[in-house]
Image (cartoon, rainbow, N blue to C red):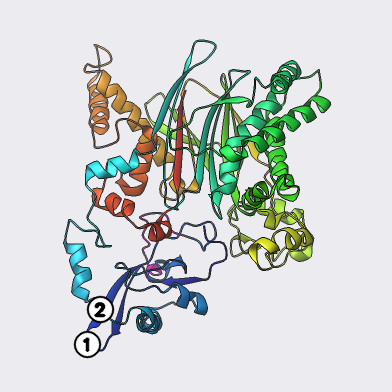
């Protein structure tokens, strides 16, 4: 994700005309829907504005990096970055962009001419997308979407089963999202998590491999903690959880020893302070695990064990990650969230209607309580600079996250440790009374009832494009499909006409073109190309075929986990 970006605003579709010596260049530039956490306010996927201010509202904030024309005949990123202007009319856009195109063309592509007819043909030719690439077939789209599918059924100690599925689709290269699914070695509890990285995947990678171990260690009763310590000392135990990985999920083998060393030290610290009496406060234990891991990330960067580990540790804490995890033990469901990933519970009422219950709250500038908390931690004279342009210190959108030590360490520490790596003063402006950022999660407890059918965990890439209610309805439809496939008769013999109609409607809806294998894939498919219970294949195919340097301007990485109760 871009960190320091100069943004411009242009219309959703602006034709830019530049006249060469012999041919006219007319290029159709699309304004991406900007969803980066380090950019201006974006519009959700597929949204359109109407009304008197529609013309102005349809301008989107565009990062100056990697902004290219559909045929890649020129790049305006460097020129736009030099100017950093905000254009508010077609005339200004065309006039200034004309100069930029001429500069870039004369500098790098003096002999390239792209007539308007070429671009118009890309839209008329159904076998080509607007980048001129061959359009993806439905089979190719499904192959891309299902590349990272994962499904698992776990038999618990009480004999019951827990089913879950997950999937993710990248827009960044490499993908900055991470996911994790695990079972505690010494209890029957399950852990699920999604992690949304920014400034690279390093921090998300680290916490996806470590946070569950910290949580499991923090939640163990004293006697189990003693047993775990003995197993670690003997070498029989290296982790506190059993992982469920997809083959494509990356694991940091070179940092395994560092992770185990920090976990072992955490166990020892817990034994020295743990109480033999009293019931565990799971919410407090989750908070402690989050905060301790974030502290260990910083300590590993400040006291490296080797030059190689120092490099890794610095990159981990300079980047950042939001986290949303679910801890499930029997009917007790705990959600711990720091940042803007989300957890949504899907329930069904007696009439068969699906409804969504959010179990997390976004930590960003739209959260009034979060703004109040932040301003209360700093002097009144900083109230106008803490949140600016919808960002922390005018830079960061999430107001809670792991890593991101630029908003946590003292200014002198940053200059001593970070400046040698990044070549300039990395301390943010108006940086007076750190820390401004915390990894402390908000925890919500929910007792799972009979009406609760599933839980959705997802990074903000999904929620940028789909509402929680729509997501729940889609997963509910997926369940209807499974029931329709396994039942060819009505549920009961004596039914009223209205009940017969309702079941027929449900079966009709279930048989519409949706993913029949994995509900997480189903959500991603409709988030990127769906409309009600159908989807637009052309829209989905275009979205998935965007080049890496352009895809991020249209959507974020998407990671989804669905857990069935």
From the top left corner, tell me how far across and down residue 409 is, in percent: 74, 55
What residue lies at 46% left-to-right and 78% top-to-bottom?
Answer: 79
Tell me the residue at 27%/86% (across/down): 20
Q: Determine if residue 454 is in view.
A: yes
Residue 358 place in picture, x, y as percent = 52, 38
Q: Is residue 356 found left or right of 229 in the rendered image?
A: left
Verify CB contact (< 8 Å) between mark 1 and mark 2. yes
Q: Residue at x 31, y 46 (%)?
A: 530
Label whose residue precedes the other's in the sequence (1 or 2): 1
Quarter of the figure with residue 501: top left
Question: For residue 45: magenta?
Answer: yes
- Residue 354 vs residue 411, the one in the foreground: 411
Q: Position of residue 545 (x, y in %)?
A: 31, 53
- The mark total stands at 2
* Disc 1 residue crowd, few under 14, some 14–19, many 20+, Cα 10 Å: few
Residue 480 x, y percent position in the rendering: 31, 27
Residue located at (66% from left, 48% from top): 313
Indicate which disc residue 113 carries: 2
Q: Nearer the viewer, residue 458 or 3?
A: 3
Q: Which residues are magenta?
A: 42-54
**Residue 533 visible in the picture:** no
Q: Is residue 297 above or below residue 331?
A: below
The span from disc 1 to disc 2 (Cα, nearest Å) is: 9 Å
Where disc 1 sits, the SS reads loop
Where is 483 relative to 4, above or below? above
Q: Which residue is mark 1?
A: 22
């Amino acid at each position: 994700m871009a960190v320091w970006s100069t943004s411009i605003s242009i219309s959703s579709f602006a034709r830019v005309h530049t006249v060469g010596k012999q041919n006219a260049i007319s290029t159709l530039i699309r304004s991406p829907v900007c969803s980066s956490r380090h950019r201006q306010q974006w519009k959700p996927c597929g949204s359109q504005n109407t009304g008197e201010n529609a013309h102005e509202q349809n301008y989107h904030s565009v990062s100056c990096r990697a902004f290219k024309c559909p045929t890649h005949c020129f790049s305006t990123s460097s020129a736009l970055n030099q100017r950093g202007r905000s254009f508010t009319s077609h005339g200004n856009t065309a006039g200034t962009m004309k100069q930029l195109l001429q500069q870039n063309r004369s500098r790098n592509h003096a002999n390239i001419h792209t007539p308007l007819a070429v671009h118009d043909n890309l839209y008329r030719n159904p076998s080509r997308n607007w980048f001129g690439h061959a359009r993806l077939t439905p089979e190719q789209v499904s192959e891309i979407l299902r590349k990272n599918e994962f499904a698992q059924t776990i038999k618990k100690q009480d004999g019951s089963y827990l089913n879950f599925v997950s999937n993710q689709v990248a827009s960044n290269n490499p993908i900055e999202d991470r996911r994790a699914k695990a079972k505690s070695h010494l209890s029957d509890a399950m852990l699920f998590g999604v992690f949304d990285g920014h400034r690279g995947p390093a921090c998300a990678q680290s916490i996806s491999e470590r946070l569950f171990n910290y949580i499991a260690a923090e939640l163990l009763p004293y006697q189990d903690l003693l047993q775990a310590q003995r197993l670690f000392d003997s070498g029989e135990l290296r982790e506190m959880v059993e992982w469920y990985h997809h083959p494509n999920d990356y694991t940091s083998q070179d940092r395994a020893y560092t992770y185990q060393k920090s976990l072992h030290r955490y166990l020892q610290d817990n034994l020295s302070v743990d109480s033999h009496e009293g019931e565990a406060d799971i919410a407090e234990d989750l908070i402690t695990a989050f905060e301790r891991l974030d502290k260990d990330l910083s300590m590993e960067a400040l006291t490296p064990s080797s030059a190689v580990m120092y490099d890794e540790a610095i990159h981990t804490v300079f980047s950042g990650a939001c986290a949303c995890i679910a801890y499930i033990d029997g009917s007790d469901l705990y959600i711990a969230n720091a940042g803007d990933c989300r957890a949504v519970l899907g329930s069904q009422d007696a009439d068969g209607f699906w409804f969504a219950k959010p179990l997390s709250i976004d930590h960003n500038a739209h959260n009034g309580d979060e703004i109040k908390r932040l301003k209360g931690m700093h002097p009144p004279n900083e109230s106008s600079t803490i949140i600016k342009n919808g960002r922390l210190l005018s830079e960061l959108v999430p107001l809670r996250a792991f890593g991101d030590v630029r908003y946590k360490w003292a200014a002198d520490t940053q200059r001593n440790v970070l400046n040698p790596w990044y070549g300039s003063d990395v301390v943010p402006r108006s940086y007076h009374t750190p820390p401004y950022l915390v990894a402390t999660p908000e925890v919500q407890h929910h007792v799972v009832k009979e009406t609760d059918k599933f839980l959705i965990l997802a990074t903000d890439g999904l929620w940028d494009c789909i509402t929680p209610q729509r997501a729940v309805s889609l997963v509910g439809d997926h369940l209807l499909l499974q029931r329709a496939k396994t039942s060819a008769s009505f549920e009961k013999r004596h039914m009223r006409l209205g009940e017969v109609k309702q079941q027929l409607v449900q079966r009709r809806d279930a048989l519409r073109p949706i993913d029949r294998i994995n509900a997480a894939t189903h959500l991603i498919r409709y988030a990127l190309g769906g409309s009600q219970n159908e989807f637009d294949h052309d829209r989905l195919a275009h979205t998935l075929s965007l080049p890496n340097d352009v895809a991020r301007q249209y959507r974020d990485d998407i990671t989804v986990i669905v857990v069935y109760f």
